[in-house]
Image (spheres, coloured by chain):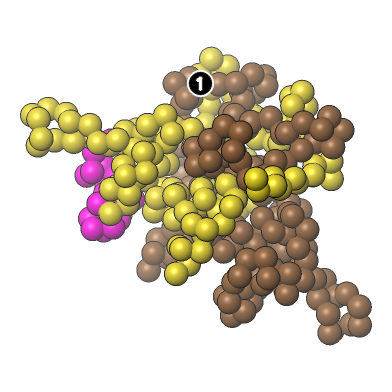
Chain colours: A yellow, B brown
Amino acid sequence: MARKRFDDMPCSIAQTLNLVGDWWTLLIIRDAFFGARRFAEFETRLGIAKNILANRLSQLVENGIMQKVDIGQTGTHYAYELTEKGRDLFPVLTALRQWGDKWVYGEGCAPMDVIERKSGRPLARMVPLGADGTPVALEDLEIRLKEKS
Amino acid sequence: MARKRFDDMPCSIAQTLNLVGDWWTLLIIRDAFFGARRFAEFETRLGIAKNILANRLSQLVENGIMQKVDIGQTGTHYAYELTEKGRDLFPVLTALRQWGDKWVYGEGCAPMDVIERKSGRPLARMVPLGADGTPVALEDLEIRLKEKS
């Protein structure tokens, strides 16, 4: 029922949550970014039940966010890899992480850093930027719903 | 059980999902950004059951993401407003929206635009930026877990 209603909402936030708005799903994607590829790796890292993991991985493959890749002997060993659509969720995970760093752990207490190798410095904090690349205050934004044609 | 496990994960993504990783919770926050303030406004916009809405709003207030503000006659009329902690979720919602615009609706078909008043142009797409403000490729990032002291 609830799922049905989200399906119907003409909103990219609702639609995205419909595809990835589940703790396990987002944490599987997180661990894929961190290098996990095999079923057993996800299972160990997440402490997730096999049936739940299998279900979420299938959904991710079905939704084109991950792909199942044959490795080793054909048809016996698989890895799960993020597709371009999946890799494009990096800003979502980064925004979630940075909010938690600030509001759950607090300044300097984050459990992990994401570092740019070149500079050795952490990523900049993600803030909404205007079309010219400068930060925008919430008060300066306006939401425009598109008219249905 | 699942909640308990997320509570224990030393990860800002897991901790943030623990606070806001629920469709309704994120959609309530979305509608607060869109101007909803009263219980009945959230109810109508979301088509959400009163008991679920009351529960989610209480949790949001308890977690310091929204605050309950007396309006009109003291103790009889309330509004729910995002706190600074709540307003700081804007990058999370923006990243979710932009992903859905691109991958669910596709170029030019997004159901809404978020426009910067000054320029009349939509927000820039959020991408991870290095400390110097230039975009960073995923391949150039390294995750460093902090050692427990």
x, y percent for residue B50: 62, 79
> Element type at marker 1?
loop
Image x and y of residue A147, in percent:
70, 47
Q: Is residue B23 visible?
A: yes
Residue B29 vertical placement versus B108 (above, below): below
Which residue lies most toward the front here? Answer: A149
Q: Quadrant of residue A126?
A: top right
Q: Can you see residue B18? A: no
Q: Nearer the viewer, residue A45 or B43?
A: B43
Residue A43, percent across and down?
26, 49
Q: Nearer the viewer, residue B84 or A103?
A: B84
Would you call the spot at circle 1 few (<14 residues within 10 Å), some (14-19), or many (20 or more)? few
Q: Residue furthest right?
A: B73
Estimate the x, y position of residue B49 in percent, counting from the top left. 58, 77
- Magenta: main secondary structure equals helix
Q: Which residues are magenta?
A: A37-54
Pinpoint the chain carrying mark 1.
Answer: B
Q: Is residue B142 left or right of residue A91?
A: left
Q: Nearer the viewer, residue A111 or A51?
A: A51
Residue at x 45%, y 62% (from the top left corner)? A3
Q: Is residue A38 magenta?
A: yes
In this rendering, would A116 be left or right of A32? Answer: right
| Residue under numbered circle 1 | B137
Q: Residue at x 70, y 55 (%)?
A: B86
Residue A145, above or below B143: below
Figure check: A23 above or below B130: below
Quarter of the figure with the N terminus of chain B: bottom left
Residue nearer the viewer, A69 or A125: A69
